Amino acid sequence: MGKTTIIGGSSGKTGGPQSSKSKRAAHGVDKIDVTAVNKPEHRELYQKRIPIYPKLAHGTYRKIKWAFLFVLLGIYYVVPFIRWDRGPGAPDQAVLADFAGRRFYFFFIEIWPQEVYYITGLLMLAAFGLFMATSLFGRVWCGYACPQTIWTDLFIAVERMVEGDRNARIKLARKPLRGKKLVKKIIKHSAWLLISFLTGGVFVLYFLDAPTVVRGFFVGQAPISAYLFTAILTFTTYTLAGTMREQVCTYMCPWPRIQGALTDEDSFEVTYRAYRGEPRGPHKKGDSWEGRGDCIDCKMCVAVCPMGIDIRDGDQLECINCALCIDACDDVMEKIGRPKGLIAYDTERNRKRLPKGEKPVYRLFRPRIILYAILVGGIAAIMMYGLMTRSTLDLNTLRDRSPTFVRLSDGSVRNGYTLKIINKAPNIRKFRVSVEGIKDSSLKAIGLETKDDTVTVVAEPDKVRVIKIYVTVPAKTVKTLKTSTPVSILVEELGGGERAVNKTVFLSGKP
Amino acid sequence: MSDRPEVDDHSGTETTGHEWDGIKELNTPLPRWWLTIWFGCIAIAIVYMVLMPSWPLPWADTYLKGLRHYSERATFEKDMVKLAASRGPDEARLINTALDQIENNPELLNFAMAAGKSAFGDNCATCHGSGGVGTFGYPALVDDVWLWGGTLDDIKYTITNGIRSTGDDTRFSQMPAFGRDGLLSKDEIKDLVEYVVSLSGREADKAAVARAQPLFADNCAMCHGEDGKGTRELGAPNLTDADWLYAGDRATITETITNSRNGVMPTWQGRLEPWTIQALAVYVHSLGGGE
């Protein structure tokens, strides 16, 4: 048999690569029998996944991760239920992508489909913000904020609560599936499914009125799409966070690949300080630390790693920079009385400087950071300006094309235009429509009265008012016109206010 | 060949036992994901066959209907019923609203225009052209010339009953074939053509015009009026304007007087729903700029 037997992954040998047996690494610190299953040399092309049983870490970064988990999940679950009064006839949900009504609501902002560039701006902000954060602090997104990380973390926490920590889970995995183990597995998977269902269900609430859907969901009154998307997202949450976990990051996600281009030698990343740690090896109490490294090879950093790698191998594509190995290692360093920070956030530059005894250098203001900051600031400013000066009146003019113009019996020429007057304001508004550009032209609109060559239109709140107008030019004026004359269609709010102008043409054929 | 399959040293995979020039074929098992999907597809196919129509039974002239009794045709019919039901209130409102009130109600006007536009494309555009531009012998509906009247009520009456058509109340008038039926001689017609040309303000043979004056008064003025401005009640066109249903050149006018023209428009009552006719009237009225 091939290499597989050596790491014992799929060959069916009992125990597998990870076992709960312990030896001593130093006084008071056990050596954990653990293999970094995703080490490059342990991974063959067609290899089945080897399960990872991450041990619970304690420390600063674990606390930060818990905080991120609770805050972000809190936001996700609470936001659809926040109400925001927009007056009668409009939905009162603070954040709502109303596909049926073709509106997107975000607190005081209401966006129409044609204003989707605000979403583009938002996505650009997110992208450049992410680029900047990555250039500065490495894969912080992957380690703390990515939904895959958050839900995987949550699912592992549930697993730990039901089945116990690493050793208990490994023991349980070896037992046959019956009795206590069966009960535990049922509890775990039920809890996972419940969380998945809540995840998928809440996602749907961003697109429909939350209280209505929640009330209707369990009595079969919600729309089919709500059930469908809840089912899909329940399934994906369960599989991605429950059964696939780190494989999503390593094999499915493009972001780890992109990030390689975003980090440089001044970006922070989780780093094993080899100059301090090597040569590694077990340490007996009372022995001198002279001539050896601080790493006692307890493998605690490998045991807590949710990605199944060994950080001491250096930068790896698999590493999501969650910093749990920092927590684990700091814990050990404290126990054996060595300074913390054998594994720490640091830059590549300092990894080269520190062994030479040079002082660490931190450069935050680098050209790419400044560029990202300018882009983020610029886009944010443009968006703010756009939102603040956003007009609540829009005009679209469609000129008749069949026929392009009509010669009337008295020789005058008439052109027809369909006007779409878009009232984005939440109140009824009156607009005056007029046409400029040709003298003697007269205006007529179907179903509306013309006064002083203008037409007054009432536009319902948050609706598009469509009117058909006709512009007629008398025969003697037509003779002075070219085949195509530019005209402007003006829509002004009565009593001052917003106005919209559309430039179009008046066609009159060969004179 | 031994009883037990040979295992390849290099890959650790069994071989099929086939050998060509020392090259052996590995019996690599199918990937698990592939097998899973394959079995999944088989399972789905079985479920589908049980639930949905799946197999023809020609000897019984039927097919396996499946537990759900799904039928594309029935679904379509149901959808059409649903569509009609959803349009119902608007249709009722359209019929119950006086024609001249529809244009004052933006919502109803939108509905009438949309319904009218699609009905026009299906039924009227064949002759009147898309957008109602008209062509030789088929009146343009976009201008301000209306043979039988351009008010909403006139238009609705014309659509409902047609022109020289089969309905009892169809609009009717008939221009005699002056030449063919021998009512006028060729020379008289020639003079009349000059007269008609002069009516619309064009250069004409003055002597011929003078000769044709009594001819016009005797034969044409009954319908087209003394001044040639036409009579809407009779669908007699105005001969003094620049608009010609059949072209206004001398040859065409000669042809018109000789053989007459009696265009036909179908009676739409009974072919179209009353609400569609209502919508068409509003749409056509708006095309002409609204008289």
Image (tube, rainbow, N blue to C red):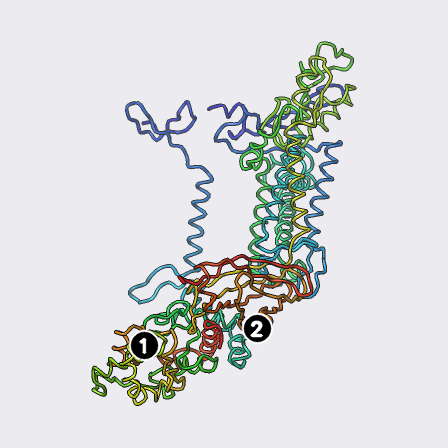
Labelled disc at residue A322: none
The one nearer the camera, A80 or A54, is A80
Labelled disc at residue A448: 2
Residue A85 image position (x, y, % from top left):
72, 60
Q: Is residue A386 above or below residue A457?
A: above
Crowd band around label 2 with a 10 angstrom C-alpha radius: few (<14), some (14–19), many (20+):
some
Q: Amino acid at mark 1?
A: Val
Q: Is residue A164 above or below residue A194?
A: above
Residue tagged 1 = B197
Residue B25 image position (x, y, % from top left):
34, 29
Crowd band around label 1 with a 10 angstrom C-alpha radius: few (<14), some (14–19), many (20+):
many
Q: Amino acid at mark 2?
A: Leu
Instruction: Determine the residue positioned at 37% across, 81% down.
Output: B162
- Same chain for the residues under marks 2 and 1 in the image: no
- Check the residue under mark 2 and report the chain it is in: A
**To which quarter of the image does residue A409 belong?**
bottom left
Q: Secondary structure at mark 2?
A: loop
